[in-house]
């Protein structure tokens, strides 16, 4: 039975997209509503399947897990961002020095001193 529901949901989604092209002479708002309507109806049909219920449960559990995360405060965020920028600057200078050194070495080996 779930396969039939999923197939019907796919048909609803396809119908919404087909409506977008079928209504090409109408205003863009109506065309977008056609796609959104097909998407909403397909979502409603999928929500009655086993896979839809599992996905909803997974989404709910994921949302609850995000509430358990200890997010950094403003001071910690600014400090961490500053450290990252400083590291990037130091690495850029280091890589520039390596590049310049290799360029000089290649010029020297090719006899293009100058």
Image (cartoon, helix red, strand yellow):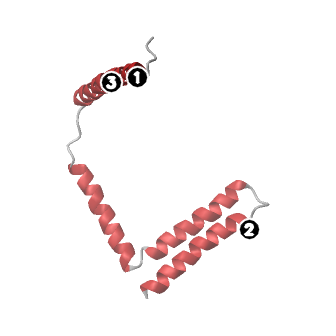
Label of residue 81 in the image: none
Contact? badges 3 and 2 (CB < 8 Å)? no
Badge 2 crowding class, 10 Å Cα cut-off, few under 14, some 14 to 19, many 20 or more, is few
**Closer-to-camera residue (21/61):** 21
**Closer-to-camera residue (58/107):** 107
Residue plotted at (49% across, 86% down): 4
From the image, tell me which residue sits under label 1: 103
Query: Would residue 28 be found to the left or right of residue 9 on screen?
Result: right
Image quarter (top left, top right, bottom left or bottom right) of the N terminus = bottom left
Which badge, 3 or 2, is on the more N-terminal residue? 2
Quarter residue 27 falls in: bottom right
Q: Position of residue 31 (x, y in %)?
A: 68, 60
Q: Please tell me whether mark 3 or mark 1 is closer to you in this view.
A: 1
Residue plotted at (54% across, 66% down): 39
Label of residue 22 in the image: 2
Cα distance between the residues tagged 2 and 1: 61 Å
Query: Would residue 105 be found to the left or right of residue 71 on screen?
Result: right
In the rendered view, would you say 27 is above or below 39?
Answer: above
**Closer-to-camera residue (89/100):** 100
In the rendered view, would you say 76 is above or below 38?
Answer: above
Q: Residue furthest right?
A: 25
From the image, tell me which residue sits under label 3: 98
């Amino acid at each position: 039975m779930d396969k039939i529901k999923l197939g019907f949901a796919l048909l609803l989604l396809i119908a919404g997209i087909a409506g977008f092209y079928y209504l090409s002479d109408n205003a863009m708002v109506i065309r977008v509503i056609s796609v959104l309507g097909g998407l909403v109806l397909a979502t409603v049909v999928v929500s009655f399947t086993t896979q839809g219920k599992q996905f909803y449960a997974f989404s709910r559990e994921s949302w609850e897990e995000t509430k358990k995360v200890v997010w950094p405060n403003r001071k910690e965020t600014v400090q961490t961002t500053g450290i990252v920028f400083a590291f990037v600057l130091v690495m850029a200078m280091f890589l520039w020095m390596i590049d310049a050194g290799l360029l000089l070495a290649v010029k020297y080996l090719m006899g293009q001193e100058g």
